[in-house]
Image (spheres, rainbow, N blue to C red):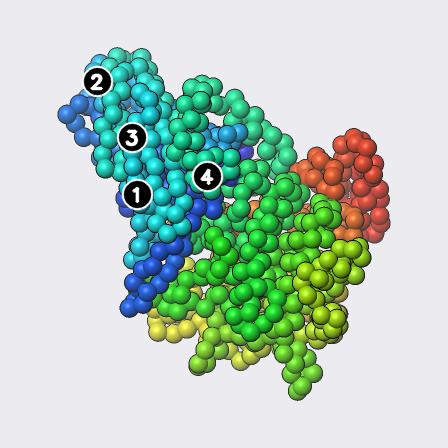
Amino acid sequence: MTDRIWEYEGYRPEQERLRESLCTLGNGCFATRGALPECAADDVHYPGTYAAGCYDRLTSQVAGRAVENEDLVNLPNWLPLRFRIPGGPWLTPDTATVLDHRQTLHLDSGLLERRTRYALGPGRALAVRQWRLVHMADPHLAALRTEFTAEGYAGELEVEAAIDGGVTNSGVPRYRALDGRHLTHTHIGTATPGTVWLRCRTRTSDIRIGMAARLTAPAPIADAHEPARAVQRLTLSLTPGRTATVDKTVALHTSRDSAISDPLRAAVERVSAAPGFDGLPASHRTAWNQLWRRAELDVPGEAGAILRLHLFHVLQTLSPHTADLDVGVPARGLHGEAYRGHVFWDELFVLPYLNLHFPEVSRALLHYRHRRLDRARAAARATGRRGALYPWQSGSDGREETQQLHLNPRSGRWLPDHTHLQHHVGSAVAYNVWQYCEAGGDAEFLHTKGAEMLLQIARFWADSATWDASLGRHRIRGVVGPDEYHEAYPGADGPGLDDNAYTNVMAAWVLARTLGVLRDLPEPRRRELVERTALDDDEPDRWEDVSRTLHVPFHDGIISQFEGYDDLAELDWDAYRERYGDIRRLDRILEAEGDSVNHYKASKQADVLMLGYLFSPAELQELFQRLGHPLDEAAWRRTVDYYLARTSHGSTLSGLVHGWVLARCRRAEAWKFCQEALRGDIADLQGGTTGEGIHLGAMAGTLDLVQRGLTGLETRSGALWLDPVPLPELSAYGFSIAYQGHWGIRLRLTSGELEIAVPPSDLPPIDVELPDRAVGVEPGETATLVVPD
């Protein structure tokens, strides 16, 4: 591997799902998994194409209940292109002898190259080379070039290309008991000689889909349509050493697209106007070059290669094209069907990176949340509260999409799912609003949509807080924290926990931050906001009170994850590791044993420690001071050590957060967790999950670890704040950012030095705050600052 390519050599059926996810190509509008075009969906392969925001809702019978789920739809498969010697079977790596096989993902250019040699008998072989792209400049185009070369023989080769509308959502084994047939009303036809089309629609959301494919080859092309498949066939005459090329260019449109009248007509017109394959890569490469310049990253060694792969997949999921769409951050990218393509809180780990490179994309993702503010307010009203309750899982319209039941693959049992009680997702939305506005200086957004979201989220927290006279504090009851393992108290009749520390501290932050925004708003804007939200005169006073009196439980000088956490039993971690080896999904192990993780001091991922991920040590101390709880460095270190020993890391986000936190308080152990975060998907550390879709939050989070975590970079109070903590394993690296209208600010960290170069412009200088001094850097200047190791 290099930082320019990602390569797999040899054919390994057991690795195909993982490779398909990591070789996905996309452009922010749609993406296609890196499956081999000659292979259909089966237990080894899973071709899938997904358009951002294209959801459909179906009802299934599960465990005697009618369960409704909304899925990101697997769209018609445009990849199929298979081949065979006349009279023989279709050649695939699973049915024929493979002499050589290599897949190369060219990161710089966004091209997937594949080379395979099939044995056809003694001294005879067929060499297949393919190039694939999903166009980054024209977000509705994709193309596949296939080159066939006969080795040691001359003869004919039958080739069949198709668009397959008979696909289903069946890429995640534990969902296969659910209805996954989302496409209906499939029609196929021929537009012009060599160009075929397929149209269909989703069953309940009624999204219309049009797809057209143009085939070019050195042989006559015949249509051979089948039900739900637009099929084209041809026969090539091969001679030794001479390459025959077949090109397939595809256009995809849906009724969610702008500036079209009909998806099918738009697809046919677009593919007809598209240049040949040779004319497509130039503009595609130009678009990719522009993306790489804006997100420049210079990290040496293996870490740099992995980070570049992560950045590649972030840009394929959330590109500048995304800014034109009404979509959120799909937790598993556009790379597979895990989590049903839903939007969680993962934007908390994604937007801070995008803010400093693609602020227009961040703004669009926040618009997704604002458009669903009314739905969030309705959800709050349904609980008897005012304000906005954002869903733990969101999809098309912002209703709660969290499944009612989930399957434990170990026990085979369907169990109630209470993760919808993770109300802290609203605080993540508020945090991202504030971070975006601080980084980009977008006063217009902050004064309008941003302030409105902050106010309604703050209102929900204030209305959720109840006064406990015995404690002399406000409490928030009946929630689930980021840990996710703990949903209820042992023996309790219903789900929910009281005073989750992360939830309460974040609620206090939201309330305090919103009060600050209200104070700083220009008077005309404040009046409009007050009128629009019907803000009562006494509400700000209540928010002030609640923001200072929310209960944060402690035990033994350590922040308790929730009230009563200290009463839980200790788990024999060594015994479980000895018995099971991998205990990341400890919840499933215990449930299969007839036990429950609710009984134990055991976390899936960072919960309390998330506070150290979101806030610098100084900010965290200020927050706790506001709440009346002095939090010195020793107490925080004790808290970190305590939960580090009680976490199973059953989420790819866990290593990321722990690496970030440890870099700040116990540097020697930080790299171990940073490495786990880097390798989470490429090594499939969660045991098969990456084949169902990459973990976008963890990938973006590793980029942000380098960008903000190790540099201590913050954007607040109109300045760049820097407090570097270089790790010995990653002590020299550089990157560029956009900040407050300055584009291409270059930061480079080396041992003992931090270099900041600001490109020439007519903008004001950048204020840089270090722990021991403040400096101003003028446009066109480079400042070299000495920082302690």
Q: CA distance from mark 4 to mark 3?
A: 23 Å
Q: Where is mark 2, residue-wise?
A: 156
Amino acid identity at mark 2: Glu
* Pick the front one: 635 or 261: 261
Residue in the picture at 22% in, 28% down: 224
Q: Residues within 10 Å of mark 4 (few under 14, many from 20)?
A: many
Q: Residues within 10 Å of mark 2 (few under 14, many from 20)?
A: some
Which element carries disc 1, helix, strand or loop? strand
Amino acid identity at mark 3: Gly
In this rendering, the label closer to the viewer, 3 or 2:
3
- The disc, 1 or 4, on the residue closer to the chain's N-terminal end is 4
Q: Where is mark 3, residue-wise?
A: 189
- The disc, 4 or 3, on the residue closer to the chain's N-terminal end is 4
Which element carries disc 4, helix, strand or loop? strand
Q: Where is mark 1, residue-wise?
A: 185
Amino acid identity at mark 1: His
Residue in the picture at 58% in, 37% down: 320
- The reply to whether dot 4 and dot 3 touch (C-beta < 8 Å) is no
Q: CA distance from mark 2 to mark 4?
A: 36 Å
Q: Residues within 10 Å of mark 1 (few under 14, many from 20)?
A: few
Q: Is residue 67 left or right of residue 736?
A: left
- The disc, 2 or 1, on the residue closer to the chain's N-terminal end is 2
In this rendering, the label closer to the viewer, 4 or 3:
3
* Pick the front one: 739 or 311: 739
Q: Where is mark 4, residue-wise?
A: 30
In this rendering, the label closer to the viewer, 2 or 1:
1
Q: CA distance from mark 1 to mark 4?
A: 22 Å
Q: Could you tell me residue 48's position as x and y percent?
A: 37, 41
Q: Which mark is residue 358?
A: none
In this rendering, the label closer to the viewer, 1 or 4:
1
* Pick the front one: 330 or 522: 522
- The disc, 3 or 2, on the residue closer to the chain's N-terminal end is 2
